[in-house]
Image (cartoon, rainbow, N blue to C red):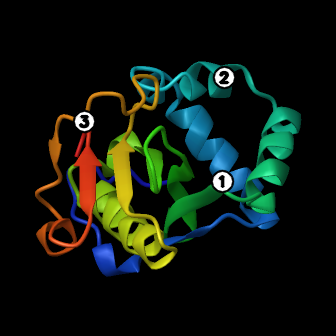
Amino acid sequence: MQDVRENKIKLDQVEIRKFVLSDLNTFAEAAKRNADHISKYLIDGKLYKAFTIHEFAIVMREYVKNKYPYQYFGAFYQGNCIGSAVLCPAGFEFGIQMIYWVDENYQNKGVATKFVNTLTDLAFKQGYWQLGCSPDGRDGFRQPHSVCPSRPRLCSVSRITCLDTHW
């Protein structure tokens, strides 16, 4: 995979979609490559660092089941996985939370914003009223920090809660 830290990417070529089994290798490569980075804010990073392809296959099989209310998504650029997100139950009424990570080389390029905006739209279309979004699910959503400024048109209809994010 090319190093894009100093280069711009074509954000319209970043695809956000649910995982399929054939994403196993590119997901495993991205997760392994970013394990140390991810472990700064998600426990998953520590797991990814130790996983073999067998453990990643077990994870991917669960991801593609998308057993309600859990939904798993990948961000893909030029055929490579550059991030992962899950929509999962939240601790507030009519709510869902989003937990995600983005490849360290693709940060500050709009990928996380595209991830969050795409999944926010999806969550509201599915009937959720509140969305907590964070790259760090450990703190849960007991104390929302602010109303998400990136989605003001939805805030008038529904409340979106964003915790400390690494956008």
Image marks 3 and 1: residues in contact by CB distance under 8 Å: no
| Residue at image coords 45%, 45% | 100
User: In what element is the residue under mark 2?
Assistant: helix
* Neighbour tally class for label 3: few under 14, some 14-19, many 20 plus, Cα within 10 Å: some
Taking depth in this image into account, of 138 and 35 the one nearest to the observer is 138
User: In what element is the residue under mark 1?
Assistant: loop
Q: Which residue is mark 1?
A: 70
Q: Nearer the viewer, mark 3 or mark 2?
A: 3
* Neighbour tally class for label 1: few under 14, some 14-19, many 20 plus, Cα within 10 Å: some
| Residue at image coords 25%, 39% | 165
Q: Which residue is mark 2?
A: 47
Q: Which of the two labelled residues, at mark 3 and mark 2, occupies the earlier sequence position?
A: 2
> How far separated are the C-alphas under marks 3 and 1?
21 Å
User: In what element is the residue under mark 3?
Assistant: loop
Position of residue 119 measured from the top left corner of the image (x, y, whole percent): 43, 66
Could you tell whether 65 is left or right of 101 in the image? Answer: right
Q: Nearer the viewer, mark 1 or mark 2?
A: 1
Taking depth in this image into account, of 162 and 64 the one nearest to the observer is 162
> How far separated are the C-alphas under marks 3 and 2?
27 Å
Q: Nearer the viewer, mark 3 or mark 1?
A: 3
Q: Which of the two labelled residues, at mark 3 and mark 1, occupies the earlier sequence position?
A: 1
In the picture, the disc for residue 144 is 3
Position of residue 86 measured from the top left corner of the image (x, y, whole percent): 55, 51
